[in-house]
Image (cartoon, rainbow, N blue to C red):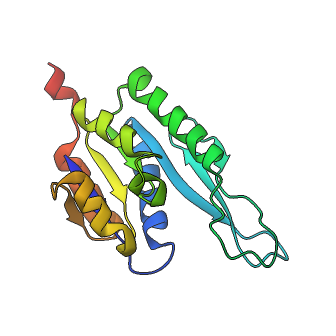
Amino acid sequence: MLAVVSGREQGETDAVLRAVAASLRDQGVCVAGAVQVNTDPSGEAVCDMDLQILSSGALIRISQSLGPHARGCRLDPDGLERAVAAVEADLSTLSPDLVIINKFGKQETDGRGFRDVIGLALAAGMPVIVGVSPGKRAAFEAFCGGLAVPLAADVVSVLAWVAAHIRSDTDAG
């Protein structure tokens, strides 16, 4: 029960996953995970990146300012690991109906980041949706062994997949 969403435009996957999470919360679905929220600080050429923890709404900054001329990766690994720890704790305390992971990126490709959280959720029988950029798709496929269902990067398609895969209250009784 693993699905992958890959938008074509920059920020498309983030917007779809945020909208899906909001819709599911409004429906009373217990969702764990994190979605990315980018903000454009005034006077800056690049955006700030935060992860919103879906259980609490808390924002954790995952970018660092490297100065106006920097060209390297702006990811703050400590911020990412704090977000990962929050989501991992939610898996055991909330028993969510669904887990949404904003991105399978370089950290996950290198064996860190949300990689273990994805595995823990799947092992516990929780459906998982992961955002993956086209550049990381091969690494993601190697990680999941081709078991992920590709979904169109639109809210309706993702919500239809979720509806077919989440546990309903009638399953318990």
Q: Is residue 79 above or below residue 170?
A: below
Q: Is residue 70 visible?
A: yes
Q: Is residue 55 visible?
A: no
Rendered image quadrant of residue 171: top left
Across and down, in percent, residue 19 comes to: 45, 59
Please tell me which residue is depicted at 51% across the width and 72% down the height of the picture.
11
Task: State whether residue 12 is above or below residue 128.
Answer: below
Q: Residue at x 26, y 65 (%)?
A: 157
Q: Residue at x 23, y 58 (%)?
A: 142
Between 89 and 153, the residue placed more toward the observer is: 89
Q: Residue 86 placed where, x, y %?
A: 54, 33
* Residue lying farthest to the right in this orientation: 43
Callout count: 0
Q: Nearer the viewer, residue 167 or 122?
A: 122
| Image position, residue 70 (x, y; %) | 74, 74
Quadrant occupied by the C terminus: top left
